Image (cartoon, grey):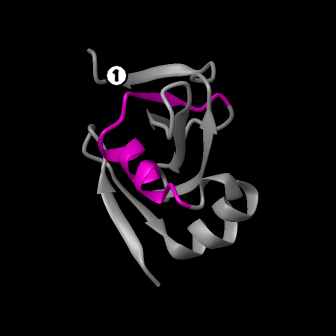
Amino acid sequence: MTETRMIDPLGRELILDDRTWYGHILKSHPEIAELRNLVELAIKALDEIHISRLDANCRLYYGQGPRSSVMMVAVADLSLGIIKTAHLARKPLAGLFEWSKST
């Protein structure tokens, strides 16, 4: 199984493995099948991190999307150190702001 290890701007290591990519993310969001590189960049070269409103252990990483009007969102479980899911969004969801590249 292939896994990609990434470090976010706050020094946290996160893993995206093939089991999650093919078994969950692409089953739920097939439109991002060719965009795994943008999911990885959403962790390494992102715009913002928000704390999930649903789970305090989860973070939403917002990065560059395939078009200027769309963002890639990678959702990570910090307690497990994994990327749980990823999808496209037009704007950040409401949630507690944790980090921004502009601050």
Q: Is residue 7 magenta?
A: no
On the rendered structure, is 35 left or right of 94?
left
Residue 92, by quadrant, is top right
On the rendered structure, is 91 left or right of 35?
right
Dot 1: few (<14), some (14–19), or many (≥20) neighbours within 10 Å?
Answer: some
Q: Is residue 40 magenta?
A: yes
For image coordinates 67% across by 72% down, the residue present is: 23
Q: What secondary structure is found at the residue carrying circle 1?
A: strand
The residue positioned farthest toward the bottom in the image shown: 1
Percent position of residue 25, x then y = 65, 60
**Amino acid type indicated by mark 1:** Ser
For image coordinates 49% across by 59% down, the residue present is: 80
Q: In this view, does 16 lie above or below 76?
A: below
Residue 29, by quadrant, is bottom right
Percent position of residue 56, x then y = 57, 35
Q: Give the range drawn in magenta.
A: 34-53
The reply to whether residue 76 is visible in this rendering is: yes
Q: In this view, does 19 lie above or below 42?
A: below
For image coordinates 59% across by 68% down, the residue present is: 20
The residue positioned farthest toward the front in the image shown: 67
Percent position of residue 99, x then y = 36, 24
**In which quadrant will I find the C terminus?**
top left
Q: Name the residue under label 1.
A: 100
